[in-house]
Image (cartoon, helix red, strand yellow):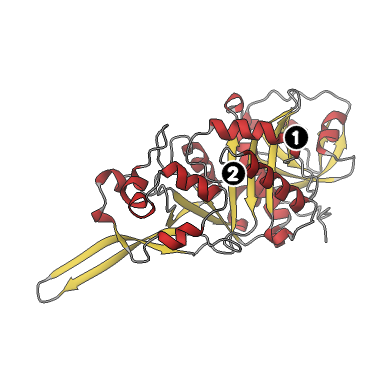
Amino acid sequence: MLVIRPLGEDDHDDLYAMAEGAGKGLTSLPASHDLLARKINRARDTFSQRSAPEAGLYLFALEDTELGRCVGISGIEARVGLEEVFWNYRLSTMVNASRELDVHVRTPTLQLTNDMTDTSEICSLLLADSHRSGGNGLLLSRCRFMYLDDFRRHFSEKIFAEMRGVSDSQGYSPFWEALGRRFFDMEFSEADYLSGVGSKSFIAELMPRFPIYLPLLPDSARAVVGRVHEKTAPALRMLEAEGFNFNGLVDIFDGGPVVEAFIHNIRSVRESTNRFVMISRQPIDLDVPADQRVMVSNRSFRDFRATTLPFRCISPDTVSMTPDMAEVLKVESGDVVRLAPLKDSGHSPIQTRDTRFATDRRPA
C-alpha cells in the first residue's frame, strides 16, 4: 500500500538516493546530505508547530508500506522571499516607434523581478523510477492541494510552481550558457547547487539589473525560454490539468516556466468532498486503474496521511475502509476524511463540493 505522510529523519537515505539520480537542475533537492538533513529538520519543526506555520516548509513522503521505504517526495514552501530574495525573469515587451520613419518595433525582453515574494510555492516533486506508474505521481502531487485547502490560512491564496528548465544529462543548459555564464563565470551545475543550498546572495550581487534583449541571445537559448525538461513535462501537464497557467515568469538559471493558480480554482480543491469513515471487515481490492480511484486524506495538520481507494468504497455519506487502511490513515469509524479525484475520469462519484460534514481536526 502507498501512503502519503510527513517526511521524517528515517527517509534521509532514500531521499538522497532519489536526489542523486535526478540529475542536474533540480534546485530544491540537490544531492547534499547536509542540506537534506536541514530540510527534513525544518519540515519536522513545521509539522510539529515549533516554527510559524506561515513560514514553514511542508515536505511529504510517499511510503511503500510493503517495502518500508520512501519512494517519493513533494513539498509546499509556505512563503518564498522572506529570508532570501526570490528572483525570476519576467518576459516583457519593449516597444520603440518612430512616426517619422514609420517604424514600430516590439522587442521581447527579460526583466529581473521579485514578483513572487510572500507567495506559497509547491516544490520538490520527485518520484523513484520504480514507482512511476499507476497514478503514484498524481497522488504525490495532488495530495498537497487537499492540504493547502484544509489549512489555507497558513498559505497565500495564489500558489505557484517553478518548473525545471531544459538541460542535458551532463548539466548543459543552453539558457545558462548564453546568459548566466556571462555574469557568474561558473558552471550551471555549480550555480544551481549554490542556489539550492541557500547561498543566493551572489544572484543579487552579479545579475544585471537592466532588461535583457532576447534577440541578442543565440537561437538555442531563445528556443528553451519557458520550456520544461523532458522529465518535468508530465508534472507540467498534471498542473495544467489542475488549472495552473504560465504567468510570464521564468527561472533565472535555466529559463524554465513558472505556473500559478489560486487555491479555490484548483480542480482537486473544487471537486473535493468530505465523508464519514466506516470500518468494514470486508476485503477491498485496491488493484484498480487510477481513473477508478479517489484520494482520501485524514485532514490532520501534524500527522497528515493520504492514500487512494476504489470508487466502490464511496457511498453518499460514508467511505468504507478496512481496519488496516484506517490504521495507516490514523482514522477511526465516524471520523471525517476528505476525498478528491485522483484522475479526471469523467465519471467520478464526487463531482461536486460537499460541505455538509464541516467537522475539522485542524489546529487553532
Task: Judge whether 108 appears above or below 241 on screen.
Answer: below
Could you tell me if residue 184 is visible in this image? yes
Residue at image point 52% right, 40% down? 235
Q: Quadrant of residue 127?
A: top right
101 sits to left or right of 60: left
Residue at the spot of label 1: 10
In the picture of the structure, the residue carrying the numbered disc 2 is 124
Element carrying mark 1: helix
The label on residue 148 is: none
Quick one: SS at disc 2?
Answer: strand
Name the spot of residue 12 as percent of width and height, x first.
Answer: 69, 36
Q: Is residue 135 left or right of residue 90?
A: right
Between 97 and 40, the one lying in front of the other is 40
Residue 247 location in percent, x, y?
Answer: 45, 57
Q: Name the residue: 43% across, 48% down.
A: 256
Counting from the top left corner in percent of width and height, residue 126 is at: 58, 37
Q: Foreground residue, 237 or 46?
A: 46
Above or below for 313 versus 194? above
